[in-house]
Amino acid sequence: MSVTPAPARIPDVLTVACIAILAYITADISHEAVGHGGACMLVGCTPHLVTSMQFDGDSSQLPQSASRIIAAGGSVMNLIVAAVAAFLLGRTKLQHPGRWFFLWLLATVSLMQATGYLLYSGLGDIGDWTEVIAGLPGHTLWKLVLIVVGGVTYWLAVRWSMLRLGARLNSEAPARAREAYRYTLVAYFTGGALAVVAGAFDPAAQAIILISGLAASLGGTSGLAWGPQLLRSPRFVARAEPLAPLIRDWRWIAAGALCAIVYVAVLGPGIRF
């Protein structure tokens, strides 16, 4: 005898948005300040500026290999954060939906940004990984490697993410995709809006907003916009214990609102050293 699943409960939009703010901010600070900034300190360069969208340091007196390490540091740190978030995700009780969703989204955004940057640099010949391969013999071949590796790993990142989310939703396919969008689209547009608002105060202004903000936030995490379509297939994911309903939680809302204000006010214009 089959059991009909209970109707999906709509998650609270404000809580989802504020959790998304925290996840996107964590991923961004990990990339710019900890990743690029930490790599800069590691190789002995002098940091000048860190904002929500860029890190600037003086490595002119260092070998080119040092610049490559600094450029790669952001994506490497995103991968480390994703691994830690995924590890904690597997140990988080489903009765704590806010915590579960934050860890899932942090792992997802970090993975998408790290792998998407490879594809972005390969296709556009711009960004961190363009600097990593600068000066290497066979530049065109290296661009092709970035495109292939970036495309494949991005797809795997989206697949991993949707497998984890889909298994915790209450709907059957194809309704599972519709339920997933209640989480992913709110997070996607919230993250993009946050990047653009903070980027409006960046010293580099419009150029950085277009290149980094829209590319990294909207382009880099675009899997949140199309990934749930994978959940329309009943073969894509096995049913598992569903996540508890994500109801309005003023703790997440207060934390998200406060962090958004500090993020825009401080890392928007940036911190100079």
Image (cartoon, helix red, strand yellow):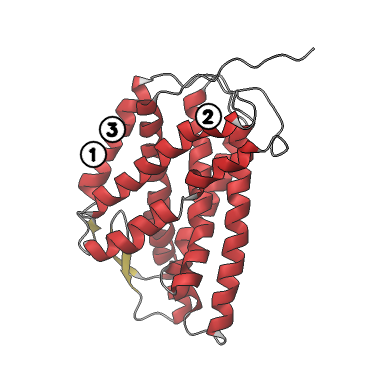
Residue 267 appears anywhere in the view: no
Q: Position of residue 124 (x, y in %)?
A: 44, 71
Look at mark 3 in the image and give the residue it sits on: 257
Nearest to the eye among marks 3 and 2: give it: 2
Whether tag 3 and tag 1 are in contact, CB under 8 A, the answer is: yes
Whether tag 2 and tag 1 are in contact, CB under 8 A, the answer is: no
Cα separation between marks 2 and 1: 30 Å
Which of pointers 2 and 1 lies earlier in the amino acid sequence? 2
Look at mark 1 in the image and give the residue it sits on: 261
The local secondary structure at tag 1 comes to helix
Quarter of the rendering containing residue 153: bottom right
Horizontal relation, residue 8 to residue 193: left or right: right
Q: Residues within 10 Å of mark 1 (few under 14, many from 20)?
A: few
Quarter of the rendering containing residue 47: bottom left
The local secondary structure at tag 2 comes to helix
Quadrant where the N terminus sits is: top right
Placement of 263 over or under 245, stated as above or below: below
Report the disc number at residue 30. Answer: none
Residue for point 61% across, 42% down:
230
Quarter of the rendering containing residue 45: bottom left
What is the three-letter code of the residue carrying label 1?
A: Ile
Quadrant where the C terminus sits is: bottom left
Which of pointers 3 and 2 lies earlier in the amino acid sequence? 2
What is the three-letter code of the residue carrying label 3?
A: Ala
What is the three-letter code of the residue carrying label 2?
A: Glu
Q: Nearer the viewer, residue 187 or 262?
A: 187
Look at mark 2 in the image and give the residue it sits on: 179
Q: Position of residue 154 (x, y in %)?
A: 57, 56
Residue for point 30% across, 45% down:
194
Q: Position of residue 50 (x, y in %)?
A: 29, 58
